[in-house]
Amino acid sequence: MSSKHKVVIITGASQGIGAALVKAYRDRNFHVVATSRSIKPSADPDILAIAGDIGDPRTADRVLHGALERFGRIDSLINNAGVFTAKPFIDFTKDDYELNMSVNVAGFFHITQRVAREMLKQGSGHIVSVTTSIVNQPIAGVPAALASLTKGGLASVTQELAIEFATSGIRVNAVSPGIIKTPMHPPETHAALSALHPVGRMGEIHDIVDAVLYLEHAAFVTGEILHVDGGQNAGRW
Ligand SMILES: NC(=O)c1ccc[n+]([C@@H]2O[C@H](COP(=O)([O-])OP(=O)(O)OC[C@H]3O[C@@H](n4cnc5c(N)ncnc54)[C@H](OP(=O)(O)O)[C@@H]3O)[C@@H](O)[C@H]2O)c1
């Protein structure tokens, strides 16, 4: 591998925000390891695609070893894979619970732990996770306790790891989106979802990509939960 290239791992990379992050990091000359269940091999030799369920520790092992074998190091990890299930708390099923815990929590834990070990050896690295502003500002009419339970944990652990790794050269940050126009939301829902933001509109994928890229280069920023949510986190509206 060429030492002039930085290497980023992006989870949930097959579509939506993750796919846009792959393109943005390649445009900035990073080597990219892109993972999700349905991801397809890339024609670009500097994108290594690894298919697997991110909640499974064996996927985390394959991503880690694939990254080191192909590119020799890991500079950044973007924990972007995630699911969102909105329903009244008492209606959640065991399957809802297990899915949210698997993708949002186990999908963070296994890959982040393995990558952090490598970053600690290198003495440098950057970890960014994607949470959601609804965990800070619950919205009446959008019951989302499983998001609070799981993504809320990501916001909290971001601050914990920022402190744990502060003197080890590893920064740990999060981006907290409002509701973003991705395949997660069919177009017919966009008008109603726009009203759930103080600014009266949904966010665009590039809003989240821009935030991740800002954090990538913000050498003095760690432990930050960067809200990119059209004002949702600011309060009531
Ligand atoms: N869109 C929003 O309004 C919004 C708001 C707040 C936060 N977020 C967060 O932003 C992140 C990206 O959202 P998005 O809207 O781009 O989502 P999306 O379009 O639904 O894409 C989700 C990505 O996660 C992957 N994924 C899902 N389950 C997985 C699993 N078990 N193992 C591995 N990969 C899995 C999917 O790929 P495969 O199907 O190929 O596995 C896909 O690439 C998520 O963490 C989401 O919670 C989104």
Image (cartoon, rainbow, N blue to C red):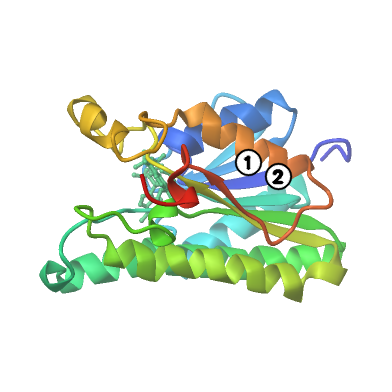
Seen at 30% across and 66% down, the residue is: 146
Q: Is residue 42 left or right of residue 232?
A: right
Seen at 88% across and 36% down, the residue is: 4
Check disc 1 and report its element: helix, strand or loop.
helix
Badge 2 amino acid: Leu
Q: Which mark is residue 5?
A: none
Which quadrant, please, contains the C terminus?
top left
Is the CB of mark 1 within 8 Å of ligand 1?
no
Distance between the alpha carbons at the discs numbered 2 and 1: 5 Å
Q: Residues within 10 Å of mark 1 (few under 14, many from 20)?
A: many
Residue 10 drawn at (x, y percent): 57, 45
Residue 5 drawn at (x, y percent): 81, 36
Residue 151 drawn at (x, y percent): 43, 62
Which quadrant, please, contains the N terminus?
top right
The answer to whether 25 is drawn above or below residue 37 in the figure is above
Seen at 61% across and 65% down, the residue is: 158
Where does label 2 land, which residue?
A: 215
Q: Is residue 54 left or right of residue 185?
A: right
Where does label 1 land, which residue?
A: 212
The answer to whether 215 is drawn above or below residue 88 in the figure is above
Specify the quadrant of the image occupied by residue 168: bottom right
Badge 1 amino acid: Val
Q: Residues within 10 Å of mark 2 (few under 14, many from 20)?
A: many
Q: Could one spot residue 133 in this view of the protein?
A: yes
Specify the quadrant of the image occupied by residue 170: bottom right
Is the CB of mark 2 within 8 Å of ligand 1?
no
Mark 2 and mark 1 in contact? Answer it, CB < 8 Å.
yes
